[in-house]
Image (cartoon, rainbow, N blue to C red):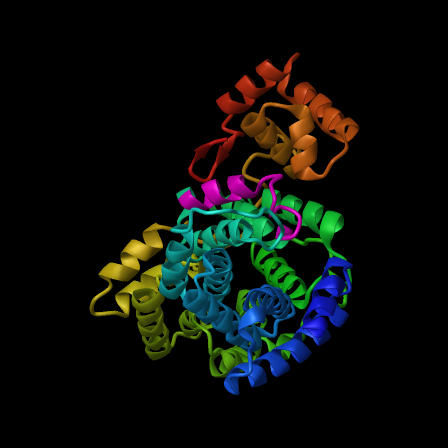
Amino acid sequence: MLTGIGSFAARRAGDADLALDGAKQFHARALAILSEGRLDESLVRPFVEVAYQAGVTMMLGDEREAAVDLLVEVERICRTHGLEYRRSSAQAALGYHYGLEGRLRKASALTRAASAYTGRQAHGDYSFVAFLQVSALVQAVMKADFVRLRHAVGSLGGGLAHTAHWDVRLLGEMLLDLAAGDAAAARVHFDAAIRAHLRDDEPGSVHRRVAYLRGILALFGETPVSVGAMTPRIAADPIRLALSAAHDIDIDDLDRAAAKLKKATTRASLPFAQHLAFVMLARLGLAEGDATLVRSAATRLRSLLRTHDLRIGFALLTEQERTASVESLSDAREMRAAFAATTAKPSRFGGTTAPLLTPRQLVVIRTLAELGDRQAVADKLFLSPGTVKAHLRAIYKKLGAHSQTEALRKAAQLGLLTTAGGTA
């Protein structure tokens, strides 16, 4: 117990490495005690509290199998002893975890079960409520459900899970920008979040996800800020291999892309990693003129769609690549419907879709249209009030406006407020 408490204290103090070491030690000892039936009934409640926090710490530190082991035990013990709040917390955390893996039906079942709890609700970075919020966002991303994604991003705006889960919220914001055809705005969101939040002592899972996001932006012709030396090695990560192979395909280095995708498809054991790897394999097949490879990849993608509802990777296919994938299948009804949920990736990149304003000015005016208050804009974009004022002054000048109301009206008339799912 003391080991687990020390791990939690280290996490609260910002020492991710020490917290993870303690959580792993607690995990090993806890499972041994449980397997031998030595858990004292009088210690059940404090045990599940500490075990839950240790499971969360291991999830953050990318010790995913161990985290699941512990959280599953927490859920089981709480179910047996009627500890409904912590049971629901474990279900919510597991739902978030399985969502990130792409096991969406399992994730949905767990979050539905957790949502049924109506008792006390603590509000904290890794609480029951926070995990339900980020789980909803992740599931919306994976399913390419942009209506629900917009709602989920809004629920995290400046709220209880905003700081701890900043990378997950960034994922949602960026995908909404990309779905609107505005890669430059996605880069601005990325750059602002990285400068505001990314530190060397962030959990390993955060460094891994920001590396993915940076790789996605590169595929849309953007050059975002560096994310430092803490990102995982490409060769060890099937998702990064797939994203790197996509870049190779874009520059016609097909041999290098093929080598990376061979590794990615071999190493991808989780549904989302498999989904992304086979999306890129379909792209490679078309680039090589290999109809058999396109059909094989499209068949695997259809299977993952049927089993896990995975769609988001289709946003990385051009119209030509989508057409080739559909034509390779004898029954492509599900794939056609899935493609319709996402905007096709441009075949090549030009300037911003609204060149009148810079990417950062676009983000500012759209956020102002959404929130209606300058201070709220500053808070959401991590800018000082003076910086927001300077951006708005420049926007007014470009639009020939003399007030906030006039600027928003002219921006709307010019189509500058258009985002995925409607106007801001």
Q: Quadrant of the N terminus?
A: bottom right
Question: What residue occupies the far front of the structure in this picture?
Answer: 42
Q: Tell whether position 150 is magenta.
A: yes
Where residue 298 appears, as percent x and y from the top left, is: 34, 70
Near-viewer residue (33 or 314) = 33
Q: Position of residue 315 (x, y in %)?
A: 44, 56
Q: In front here: 266 or 321?
A: 266
| Residue occupying the far left of the picture | 330
Q: Residue 386's image quarter?
A: top right
Q: Position of residue 21 (x, y in %)?
A: 72, 76
Q: Quadrant of residue 184?
A: top right
In the foreground, 56 or 146 = 56
Q: Position of residue 92 (x, y in %)?
A: 48, 58
- Vertically, is 346 above or below 412? below
Q: Is residue 178 magenta?
A: no
Q: Is residue 248 visible?
A: no
The residue at the point 49 percent across, 21 percent down is 413
Residue furthest top in the image: 402
**Residue 423 in sight from this viewpoint:** yes
Q: Image quarter for residue 110?
A: bottom left
Q: Residue at x 70, y 67 (%)?
A: 5
Q: Is residue 91 above or below residue 346?
A: below
| Image point (38%, 58%), residue name | 108
Q: Residue at x 59, y 75 (%)?
A: 237
Q: Which residues are magenta?
A: 148-166
Q: How many numbered dots are placed on residues in this image?
A: 0
In the rendered view, tell whether residue 117 sits above or below residue 30.
above
Observer-nearest of 407 and 39 = 39
As displayed, is residue 157 above or below residue 374?
below
